[in-house]
Structures are given as C-alpha cells and as structure tokens.
C-alpha cells in the first residue's frame, strides 16, 4: 500500500515538473527583431493552397467526377457554398456539384 502511495506521489512530482510555466514577465516589450512588420508581404503568384472556386469562372471547360470523369462547362460558381453549376456534355440538364468534384482542364 505504501509503495502505491509513494509511486503516485513520485508520478505527480514528475508530471508537475514537466508542466511549462512562463518565466518572463508579461510587461516585457518585444525586441525589434521579433516585431511583426506593419505591412504584410504580398506575392504576385497565387498560392497553391487557394480554393479551386477562385480559379474557376463561367465558361471554363472542366471534368466532373460523378463515377467517371465527364466533360462539362461551368455555368456559375458559388464560392460561399463551395458549389458550382455545370452542364455536362451530352446531357440537357444543368447540375450543381461541390467544387471538390470538379477539375479544371
């Protein structure tokens, strides 16, 4: 019984020693090398993580993934709901699908 209590106390001491604590005072000002610049850096090229909807526009030729890759034309893009309305070649009706189901050609 005393071994269990001793082991529990040792474990709690070890865990409390591993907790991170703030050693610097909170009122210290950051050094100029650490300060963020007032104007963000801009890049001329689009980032690879941009959404596909921002790259699609009306009239673009795309391939729709609905079991197989079907050629289609973009009718409209709704970036808020992440949906795109397309017209698949060979079908009369327009279809609204998620942006993730469309690949630009």
Image: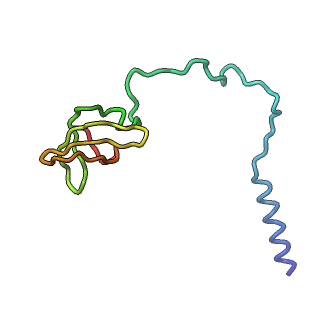
Please tell me which residue lies in front, 30 or 3: 30
Q: In the rendered view, would you say 28 is above or below 92?
A: above
Residue 67 falls in image quadrant: bottom left
Q: For the point 39% across and 42% down, which residue is it?
A: 82
Residue 73 falls in image quadrant: top left
Tell me: 69 left or right of 101: left
Residue 10 falls in image quadrant: bottom right
Please tell me which residue lies in front, 32 or 52: 52
Q: In the rendered view, would you say 2 is above or below 77?
A: below
Tell me: 10 left or right of 95: right
Q: For the point 66% across and 25% down, which residue is it?
A: 34
Image quarter of the N terminus: bottom right
Q: In the rendered view, would you say 10 is above or below 79?
A: below
Image quarter of the C terminus: top left
Expressed as whole percent of the image width and height from the top left, the position of residue 41 reads 51, 21
Q: In the rendered view, would you say 11 is above or below 70?
A: below
- The residue lying furthest to the front in this view is 93
Expressed as whole percent of the image width and height from the top left, the position of residue 85 reads 29, 42
Q: For the point 34% across and 47% down, which residue is it?
A: 98
Q: For the point 82% across and 60% down, which residue is it?
A: 13
């Amino acid at each position: 019984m005393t071994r269990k209590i001793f082991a529990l106390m040792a474990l709690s001491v070890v865990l409390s020693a591993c907790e991170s604590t703030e050693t610097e005072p909170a009122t210290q000002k950051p050094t100029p090398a650490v300060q963020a610049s007032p104007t963000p850096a801009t890049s001329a090229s689009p980032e690879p993580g941009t959404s596909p909807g921002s790259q699609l526009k009306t009239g673009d030729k795309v391939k729709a993934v609905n079991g197989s890759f079907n050629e289609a034309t973009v009718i409209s893009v709704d970036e808020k709901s992440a949906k795109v309305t397309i017209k698949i070649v060979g079908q009369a009706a327009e279809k609204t699908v998620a942006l993730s189901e469309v690949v630009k050609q």
